[in-house]
Amino acid sequence: MRRETSPEDVGGMAVAQGVLTATGGKTSHAAVVARGWGKCCIVGCERLFIDYAAKQMSTNGHVIRQGDWITLDGSDGTVYAGQVQLATPEMPKHYHTILKWADEIRKLGVRANADTAQDARKAREMGATGVGLCRTEHMFFKDFEHPERSAERQLAIQEMIIADSREARQKALDRLRPFQRGDFMGIFRAMDGYPVTIRLIDPPLHEFVPHDPEKQKELAEKVGLTPQVVARRVEQLRESNPMLGHRGCRLLITYPEILDMQVGAIIEAALECRKEGIKVIPEIMHALTLDRKELKILVDETRRIADDLIQKVGIKLHYLVGTMIELPRAALLADELAEEAEFFSFGTNDLTQTVMGLSRDDAGRFLPEYLDEQKAAIFTTDPFQTLDRAGVGMLVEWAIQRGRRTRPHLEVGICGEHGGDTESVKFCYRVGMDYVSASPFRVPIARLAAAQAMIEEKRKKRARSAAAD
Amino acid sequence: MRRETSPEDVGGMAVAQGVLTATGGKTSHAAVVARGWGKCCIVGCERLFIDYAAKQMSTNGHVIRQGDWITLDGSDGTVYAGQVQLATPEMPKHYHTILKWADEIRKLGVRANADTAQDARKAREMGATGVGLCRTEHMFFKDFEHPERSAERQLAIQEMIIADSREARQKALDRLRPFQRGDFMGIFRAMDGYPVTIRLIDPPLHEFVPHDPEKQKELAEKVGLTPQVVARRVEQLRESNPMLGHRGCRLLITYPEILDMQVGAIIEAALECRKEGIKVIPEIMHALTLDRKELKILVDETRRIADDLIQKVGIKLHYLVGTMIELPRAALLADELAEEAEFFSFGTNDLTQTVMGLSRDDAGRFLPEYLDEQKAAIFTTDPFQTLDRAGVGMLVEWAIQRGRRTRPHLEVGICGEHGGDTESVKFCYRVGMDYVSASPFRVPIARLAAAQAMIEEKRKKRARSAAAD
């Protein structure tokens, strides 16, 4: 139970049976991570008052203490006091047959969002033919293959952030590099023959460092600094609106050594896997870009680092460099961005946030009223669940058309949570995307929706030609 | 000296000789407020470490304590230790002649951003012919005409926010209403014969309540609640990204009683002034709208409240109801919004933040690098100072064209800080705006720029027709 979660909590979430947060909505960090793992999760439980210091929460006069049992129903959002008896759902009989039919019909590709080898194997099992989004930062907090090494990773990333010189930062990055390389190898192996889109570091750095004095003291001891220096550095990282702050590719513009480490780890992993006879198709993705010049700096540097390594090893390796489209400016200037990017991936979570000026973590305060049929009834569906076609969708369509005008074979996909929503998947097909990417557990829904979109399109065409006769 | 300022600090800023903040950029709260008052201000001084508890700041090894002298040079951003001798600049000899010429040439209107009667009088003195933005929330913290009553205002707004029932909220609003009415009367009197655009409450409510335990205790005593209840309410208001949170018209959708109070105060003030023989042209403006249905609810309710009061008093009063365009979705769907709005005012500060995904308060961390010619050189000018024509500008132009397709005589202006920037003013003229609105002290620049835009346009036309011959 947390007020909200951040990458710092990923380790704890991995061992939890379920996740319950007081704030947030369908695309807040807790929801996205839990969905990726097929884990039960309830977010935006606004009536919870969670007291971290007292290790308890209260709601409607009830107090639940650490160690007490509660039961979550993730389908309807009910929280039960005590331990309710559970039943495991069974797969419907014709599940595989229907999905086989769906795959035969559909033209839209379905990839999965997967951050670890474990996720990637799950994704293949669910029928995904590629990874559409690998969030490299989730690797920083938890070693899923060797949990006992998690603390070591975490320390390296924190040391990198606290570092006050380029040398100290480089030292920490050198320790992170083999971890990242190993993670990428695991994913490439699981995706043998299928593309893997890897997004470079995205969240603001303050999400990776401890905020309470106790943990800051611990960190200070480990890295050999005073707690005051650590506290000051954490304070310096504080942002008024971290969502619109120093994150995504902005971090790589200011700290090019992070780009060097991440691209190096990806290419080294790819080359290693090639030696093992695995077919590797890496797609390196820059996040939060907003300008052609900015993207050019990043793409040029990415290619320089990658080509150097490839040349040294002497193995042929084909890779793509592309960008997320998650800011309105990137969508508006898509024709320019496509000069540099070999692919676009629509980050519709962030694009929804910026187009609508709606924080996914804070919208719980008023969005229910906006959706309530008895009250304002402004929206018919939650824009974080089903893509807002009128606004966000207009910009997506514009960007695809403009992007392909510059680069006709531009690969286009979506990696926001909308990739696992039926209506949104149909929209993605209609506007000409090559693939959608969803959490592994939502891949079957995406496969089915992609087939339905084809059938609906055909029916409409038939109806139109009948009307014309 | 503050890390950053918020509406809570407006009283303190009003009595300060200058303002210095550790974070922020050209459109952060401190910069906007100080500019409006013609007050010296330096923001984004990232090397300052301000320690509120110790009442001191340190930078480069120097420590400055509360009560020490420092001197600010607002033009180049230098902070001097100690008291430097100052000189008052003199107005150039031909100032009035040149501005008279400019006014004769220009077609673009120039209004001012003014939150108080004092600002409005200054605006008239500077040659503004109307108020393009009156930010009602600045009135909540300081009574500029009767400073001794400031505490009373502040308490009423805080009580309104802390209120846990509609009744308690209504009681606090009833006490605020005469204050707001008085403020509006002062502005209407100063603007006799010129339009006054009043923006309804905009910032998130947490900006109005105290965050330190001491002040929370004080507030609790005054309103007759326990400090725990106050602390809990403040905690509930905390947002991850307040810029994208529960603010603007979202507050009026969830708390319609605030709309009732504000519209009531505006119309009552207008009717009172009409009785005094003053010509009043109120333009009531909704902020942060993103959808036609949302705007329709607000406009209908605004008209109902206003028309009721007008009918009761029996005096004829013409007023407009319109909207800011400050979210990409509002700009994209401008044709729909123009069905409800009688005017558009581009809030290009927030529009820049959302289109570019750039927080004005946090951009200080990386924007300097983006602007540095020796480094990334991604932007040639600060997008918060000079409007980003390629991205934000594209959306502004789109919205004006779409809006006027629905409503040919739609009044269009700009009220972001760009309204006082030469290049941006020229852009506003070229895309067909009716007026720009700037801080009173920047009005002369806007008048001059508007004339220059006309002359440049004429020259271009002449060159084109010469080339055609």
Image (cartoon, coloured by chain):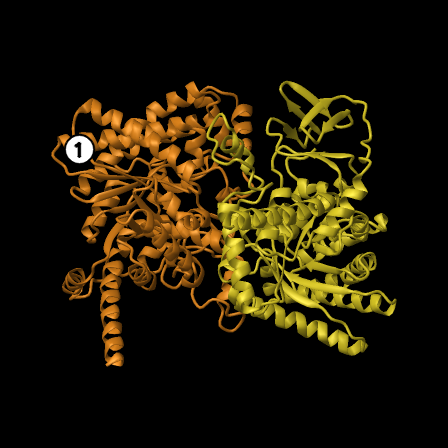
Chain colours: A yellow, B orange
Give the quarter of the image for residue B84. Answer: bottom left
In the picture as drawn, the residue positioned furthest to the right comes out as A276
Q: Tell me which residue sits at (82%, 60%) in the image.
A: A192
A95, B465: nearer the viewer? A95
The image position of residue B78, as x and y in percent, is: 41, 62
A140, A103: nearer the viewer? A103
The image position of residue A279, as x and y in percent, is: 81, 65
> Would you say residue B277 is visible in this rendering?
yes
Kindly identify which chain the residue marked by label 1 belongs to. B
Q: Mark 1: which secondary structure? A: helix
The image position of residue B76, as x and y in percent, is: 39, 64
Q: Is residue B370 above or below residue B63?
A: below
The image position of residue B303, as x and y in percent, is: 30, 31
Q: Is residue B116 above or below residue A152?
A: above
A93, A222: nearer the viewer? A93
Q: Tell me which residue sits at (46%, 27%) in the image.
A: B219
Give the quarter of the image for residue B199. Answer: top left
Q: Is residue B135 left or right of residue B269?
A: right
Local packing at callout 1 (Cα closer than 10 Å; few below 14, some 14-19, many 20+) is some
A224, B119: nearer the viewer? B119
In the picture as drawn, the residue positioned furthest to the front comes out as A469
Residue marked by disc 1: B273
> Would you say residue B62 is visible in this rendering?
no
Q: Is residue B278 left or right of residue A223?
A: left
Q: Amino acid at mark 1?
A: Cys
- Quadrant of image for the C terminus of chain B: bottom left
